[in-house]
Amino acid sequence: MRLARFRFKYDPLVATMMAALLVAACAPAVGTASPDPTSSPTAMPTEPATGSPAATERPTPSPTAPAEPTAPPASAWRQLEPSGEAPSAREDGTWTQQEGGRTAFLFGGRDGGTILDDLWAYDLDSDRWTRLAPEGQAPPARFGHEAVWVNGVGVVVFAGQAGPTTFYGDLWAYDPDANRWRQLPGDGVAPIPRYGSCAALGPDGRLWISHGFTEDGTRFADTRAYDFTAGRWSDETPDGRAPVNRCLHGCWWSGDGQFVLYAGQTTGVAALGDLWSLRGAGTAAAAWTKEAGDLPPERNLYAFTRHGDSIVVIGGGGPDRQFLGDAFTINDATLVADPLQPTGTKPPGRAGAMLIDDAVRGRVILFGGKTSAGALADLWELSVP
């Protein structure tokens, strides 16, 4: 709607009377408190007309409060539904990620009394499984073995078990480019065949293993290293105090070159919760150190993988033989554990599951394991900040 314009004739007497009325209307009433000069105005005053003798300087606005810092993204669970054929249910297999690549290789494991020897490739970009059919002789079916990726060699599998009295101490390598397995020589001071050991590729390029279990009820506390160039084992067990004999534990190399061993099981104790670091590994000064500090509840057969500068740990078997479903990280520098509190539907607690890292997509992926109902074949991703 347009406003009508009015014209009027200036009258000095009328102007004087109007000015007096305006002054009386704007003056505070008797007894009214004056405004607090330190308080912020509730509304911005209207800009006075340019050149008006009554114009005053605009008040300075109060400083704006700084924005709240953005919270880091929370972790969250999501179940994956890969297309096509997928591996059968299993526990205690290995899932080994190709360094710098986008493929992870699943080998072996068991479903109750069924011992497996199948090999699968998982594509991290498409979330798709592919069953592989390698040429030539392959490792015998097994569970409770260890596997690492070695550049120029491929997926290296060590030890494992195939029955109540069948234990392995052999080494096998799968070359994805040739799609072929080959057995590696095992000269030198080779480890006694075992199940439930741990293994990690050291900064010196050697495969390091420690502890484990065999058929006569013996649990070990030795540490050995395998040189791929020489095809030989050496005994790297340091003198002095060491982690108690155990199996069903895990180990890895920290960013500052320490060989770290965590949790597991020993005779008469269903689950351990201690954490040790082997400082100076491979030198005459090598020594185990028990790390202090609070750690999560005791566990064995947990799933773990490196993610950035931390190790992500999920689930395992608890001290009362319960199946755990928690998740936490262990920091490389401090070896301190911090809990993760993911949102979303949580997978059932489990032991013997397999875990890989997907740094490109900011997640870790969990496969299989077992509960009181038996082996699992489900696949989950956990986003990790």
Image: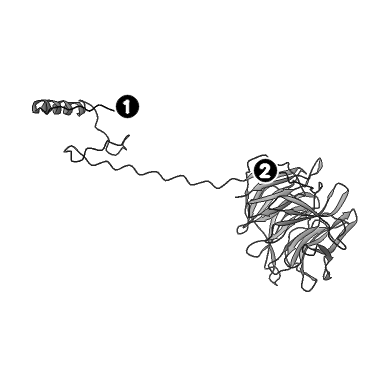
User: Disc 1 marks which residue?
Assistant: 1
Q: Amino acid at mark 2?
A: Arg
Q: Amino acid at mark 1?
A: Met
Give x and y (percent) for residue 13. Answer: 8, 26
Q: Residue at (16%, 25%) from the top-left corner?
A: 21
Residue 305, compared with residue 204, is above or below; it is above
Are the residues tagged 1 and 2 within 8 Å (C-beta)?
no
Q: Residue at (69%, 61%) from the top-left corner?
A: 99
Q: Is residue 140 visible?
A: yes
Residue 287 picture quarter: bottom right
Dot 2: what SS?
A: strand
Q: Residue at (22%, 28%) from the top-left corner?
A: 5
301 vs 364, left or right, is: right
Dot 1: what SS?
A: loop
- What is the CA distance from the residue labelled 1 to the residue labelled 2? 57 Å
Residue 305 picture quarter: bottom right
User: Disc 2 marks which residue?
Assistant: 78
Q: Is residue 272 visible?
A: no
